[in-house]
Image (cartoon, grey):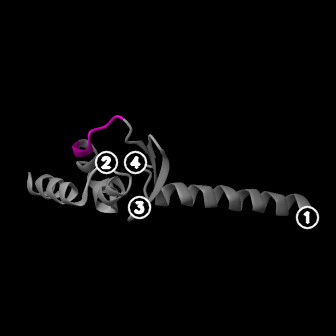
């Protein structure tokens, strides 16, 4: 009985970790790590480093842009609000 309970606890932990990874982007940058909530459960861009990437290249990734990476870039000081708005407008209006 105890063995079965231990198995269920381990399974619950694994499912919880899997759900966490599917529902969050884990963003690495020079000063640390930030979490960004995904708009839907997916494994795309779960781990991403923005350390040596241009801001334009980061914002071109539709999934990250839709989930709010622009606001995160403003928060960590890679962009100001006006630059973010301008870049998002250019990227979304370009075919």
Which circle, 1 or 2, is nearer the viewer? 2
Q: Determine which residue is flagged by label 1.
A: 1
Whether residue 77 appears in this view of the structure is yes
Spatial CA span between label 1 and label 3: 38 Å
Q: Determine which residue is flagged by label 2.
A: 78
Q: Residue furthest top?
A: 52
Do tag 1 and tag 2 residues touch (Cβ < 8 Å)? no
Query: SS of the residue at dot 2?
Result: loop
Location of residue 4 in the rendering, given as x and y in whole percent from the top left corner: 84, 61
Do tag 4 and tag 3 residues touch (Cβ < 8 Å)? no
Query: SS of the residue at dot 3?
Result: loop
Q: Determine which residue is flagged by label 3.
A: 38
Spatial CA span between label 1 and label 2: 54 Å
Location of residue 2 in the rendering, given as x and y in whole percent from the top left corner: 91, 62
Do tag 3 and tag 2 residues touch (Cβ < 8 Å)? no
Residue at 45% from the left image edge and 49% from the top image edge: 46
Spatial CA span between label 3 and label 2: 21 Å
Mark 4 or 3 closer to N-term? 3
Q: Residues within 10 Å of mark 2 (few under 14, many from 20)?
A: some
Whether residue 95 appears in this view of the structure is no
Q: Residues within 10 Å of mark 3 (few under 14, many from 20)?
A: many
Q: Determine which residue is flagged by label 4.
A: 45
Nearest the eye: 5 or 13: 13
């Amino acid at each position: 009985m105890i063995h079965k309970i231990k198995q269920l606890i381990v399974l619950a932990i694994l499912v919880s970790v899997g759900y966490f990874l599917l529902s969050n982007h884990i963003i690495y940058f020079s000063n640390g790590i930030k979490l960004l909530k995904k708009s839907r459960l997916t494994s795309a861009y779960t781990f991403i480093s923005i350390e040596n990437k241009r801001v334009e290249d980061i914002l071109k990734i539709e999934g990250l842009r839709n989930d709010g990476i622009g606001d995160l870039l403003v928060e960590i000081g890679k962009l100001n609000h006006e630059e973010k708005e301008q870049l998002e407008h250019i990227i979304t209006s370009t075919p």
